[in-house]
Image: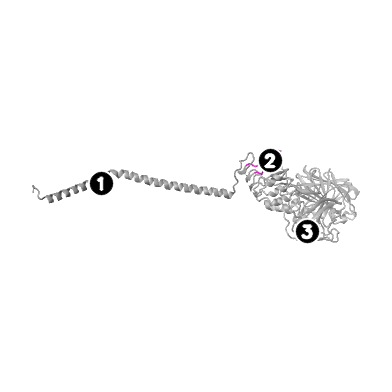
Amino acid sequence: MLRLRLILLLLAFCLELKPSFSRAPYALRISCGARNDVHSPPSNTLWYKDFAYTGGIPGNATRPSFISPKLSTLRYFPLSEGPENCYNINRVPHGHYSVRIFFGLVSEPSFDNEPLFDVSVEGTLIYSLPSGWSNHDDERAFVEAFIFLKDGTASLCFHSTGHGAPAILAIEILQVDNKAYYFGPGYGQGVILRTDRRLSCGTRDPKFGVDYSADHWGGDRFWNSIQTFGEISDRAISTTNSIKQASKSPNFYPEALYQTALVSSDSQPDLAYTAEVEPNRNYSIWLHFAEIDPSVTAAGQRVFDISVNGDIKFRDVDIVVRALQKLKSALGLPLRFGWNGDPCVPQQHPWSGVDCLYDRTISKYVIDGLGLDNQGLRGSLPDDISQLHHLQNINLSGNSLHGFIPSSLGKIASLEILDLSYNFFNGSIPESLGQLTLLQRLNLNSNSLSGKVPVALGGRLLHRASYNFTDNKGLCGIPGLPTCGPHLSAGAKIGIGLGGCVAFLLLVTCLTCWWKRRQNILRAQRIAARDAPYAKARTQFSRDVQMARHHSHENARTADENGPSLLS
C-alpha cells in the first residue's frame, strides 16, 4: 500500500463574472493624485502622473498595507462629486489585461473611517469592499481582474454606497497573454476573472512578480505566503534546483514559486486548506505541483487524490509519470513541449500533443491520444508506449523516427488510429497489430519496412478498415503489393550477391584464357601455312644432291675394279 503524501505549491482562486502576443506587453501604471511621474522603491517602478483621466480631488495618502505601492498621493471622490466616478483611459491596445486597483486612506483628520464602495470594470461590478479591509495586510488592499479590452479604452468606475468617499491610491493596466488562465468553453470576450487570492506555499515572504524577476507577460501578480495550513504535522520544504519549463506561455509562473512547498507527514497524510468564498459564485481553482522532494525518484511513490468540498475531482494523481517520461526521452521531444508534471491536469493546460479524456468508470483523466505529427522528432518508439493502454489515436507521421515498430502496440486494445507514415521505420510489421480488433486506420506508408504483411491485417481490409502500406519497397503479401517469394534474410541476400559476383568473375577469366589460347593456335597455323613452299623445295634439293653423290661413288668403285679405261 503506497503511503500518501501530498505537496501543495500554489493555490489561486479566480471569481468568474459573466455580463497574440509580442515580447513588449503594454503597461500603464498611474499614481492617483500625483502631479508628476514618480518611481517607487524598492524596484524603482515608474508610475505616471494622474492627469485628465477623471474628476475627484487629489490628496495625501496613507497606505493601508505594506503590500501597497509606496506612493504618497491618492484621489478621492466625495459624494458632492456624484455617486459614481470613473477613470476613462484611452489608447489602450486591443488585448487581454490584468487591471489592478489599489485602495487608499485619505491622510486628513476629517477622514477617520475606511471608505466602503463598489468597483466596476467596463460596466461590470467586480468587487464590494468589505468592512475591515484596511486592517489586513493581504489581497484586500487591492482588487485585480483579468479582462479583454477591444475598443481602445478602459473604464474603471467607483460607486459610493454612503460609507465614505471612494479613495484610489494607484491603478495598473498590464497586458497578459491572450490565453492566460484559460478555463475552457466560455473563455474570452465578455468574461471577467476576478482574483480572490494566490498562495505560495512554504515561503516566508509575500512577493510580487517583479520581486521574483518574473516575465513581464505574467502581469506582475501578487503571491501571498503561507507556511502552514494549520495542520500540526505539515512542514515546509524547499530546493535550489532549477525547475525546467516553469515560466512558459500562457501564464508565465515564476520558477521560484515551484522551489518551495508544504509537505504532509506519514502520521497525517492529508493536507486541507479552507477558504471563505461568496455563495452563488463560480470559482476556478488552480493547483500547481512539482516534485522537489529528493526522496521521491520514481512513479508510484507519491500518489494522491484531490477533493473539493468532499468530492474527489482528481484521483490517483502522480507527479512522476514514468511511461510518458520514457516516451519523451525515446522520441527526442524538443524542450518547447515541456512535458512536466501531470499530463492532464489542470484540464485547461494539458501537455502539448497529448489528448486527455475523463473516464467516469475510474473517476480520473486518462490519455487517449498522442498527436505529435510533423514535429521534427528523431528518436524511436519505445515498448513502454503500451503502458498508455487507453490510447485510441497515435499520430507520429511526418517525423524522422527510426528503428522497429514495437510489437507492444498490439497490447493497446482500444487503439483505433495508428499513423506512423513518412518516417524511417524498418524491419517487419509486427504480427501483434493484427490483434487490434478496433483498428480502423493504419498508415505505415513511406517507411523502409520489409517482409510479409500480417495475414490478420490483410483480412481486415474486408471490414471497411483503411490501411496504407505503399512506398515500402520490401513489403509484400496483399493486393497492391508484390507477391512474397522465399524469405531471405539480409545476410543471405548479401551472400547470394557476392557469390554471383565471384562466379561471374571466374567465368570471365576462363573465357579470357580460352580466347587467348585460341588466338595463339590460330597465329601459329597462319605462320606455318605461309612458310610451307620454301621448306618443301629445300627438302627436295637436298635429297637430289644426296642421291647424285651416292650414284657417283658407285661409278668410281666400278672403274677401279675393272681397270683403266680405254680412254685413259
Looking at the image, which is closer to me, 369 or 434? 434
Q: Is residue 211 visible?
A: no
> What amino acid is found at the position of numbered circle 1 in the picture?
Thr
Instruction: Identify the residue position indicated by label 2 in the image.
Output: 459
Calculate the distance from the C-alpha at mark 1 to the C-alpha at mark 3: 125 Å
Numbered disc 3: secondary structure: strand
Mark 1, Cα crowd under 10 Å, few <14 / some 14-19 / many 20+, is few
Marker disc for residue 539: 1
Q: What's the magenta region?
A: 453-470
Looking at the rendered image, the disc whose residue lies closer to the viewer, 1 or 2, is 1
Mark 3, Cα crowd under 10 Å, few <14 / some 14-19 / many 20+, is many
> What amino acid is found at the position of numbered circle 3 in the picture?
Thr
Q: Name which residue lies at 78% across and 59% down.
A: 260
Looking at the image, which is closer to me, 279 or 205? 279
Q: Give residue 174's position: percent from left, percent from top.
A: 77, 49
> What amino acid is found at the position of numbered circle 2 in the picture?
Gly
Q: Give residue 16's position: percent from left, percent from top.
A: 83, 46
Calculate the distance from the C-alpha at mark 1 to the C-alpha at mark 2: 93 Å
Instruction: Identify the residue position indicated by label 3 in the image.
Output: 260
Say whether disc 1 or disc 2 marks the residue closer to the N-terminus.
2
Say whether disc 1 or disc 3 marks the residue closer to the N-terminus.
3
Calculate the distance from the C-alpha at mark 2 to the C-alpha at mark 3: 57 Å
Q: Is residue 558 magenta?
A: no
Q: Is residue 209 visible?
A: yes
Numbered disc 1: secondary structure: helix
Numbered disc 2: secondary structure: helix
Q: Name which residue lies at 27% across and 45% down.
A: 535
